[in-house]
Image: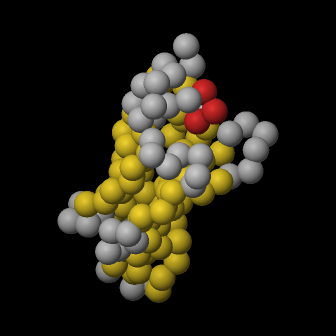
Amino acid sequence: QVQLVESGGGLVQPGGSLRLSCAASGSIFNIGPMSWYRQAPGKQRELVAVITGGGSTNYADSVKGRFTTSRDNAKNTVYLQMNSLKPEDTAVYYCNAFISTVQGRRDYWGQGTQVTVSA
């Protein structure tokens, strides 16, 4: 059974920083692209950042220059460093990963972690 567990969310003032982590566990053969999504109240879930197995990254225009994603393949963990946070970054943040197991390859989701940017 594969699980993705996120941590690092919380309340932060505008201009502040947070670092999210997402660790995959279970009988994992390989992890492909790992992504961060977010969903604000009343809005659709949107892609924030993605990192491939080789370390190539891509970001939503709204977070370019402020957010950085990275991964530690030895720990099966992906990170999202969020700087210069704005109130509009407030959302539940989810990680997603394409993972190969003995049962095949599919994507998995974390449970989500709340990020609130407010004075």
At 76% across and 44% down in the image, what residue appears? 43
Judge whether 82 appears above or below 23 on screen: above
At 40% across and 80% down in the image, what residue appears? 101
Give the image location of residue 65, x and y in percent: 45, 46
Judge whether 18 appears above or below 66 on screen: above
Of the pair 28 and 45, the residue shown nearer to us = 45
Residue 52 lies in what quarter of the image?
A: bottom left
Give the image location of residue 109, x and y in percent: 53, 60
Give the image location of residue 26, x and y in percent: 34, 67
Asked whether the viewer can see residue 27, the reply is no
Residue at the far top in the pictured view: 119
Give the image location of residue 89, x and y in percent: 58, 36
At 74% across and 50% down in the image, what residue appears? 44
Q: Is residue 89 left or right of residue 15?
A: right
Of the pair 104 and 63, the residue shown nearer to us = 63
Q: Is residue 87 left or right of residue 97?
A: right
Q: Is residue 34 left or right of residue 107?
A: left
At 36% across and 61% down in the image, what residue appears? 24
- Tally the numbered discs: 0
Judge whether 81 appears above or below 88 on screen: below
Residue at the far left in the pictured view: 74
Q: Quadrant of the C terminus?
A: top right
Residue at the far right in the pictured view: 42
Q: Is residue 109 left or right of residue 80?
A: right
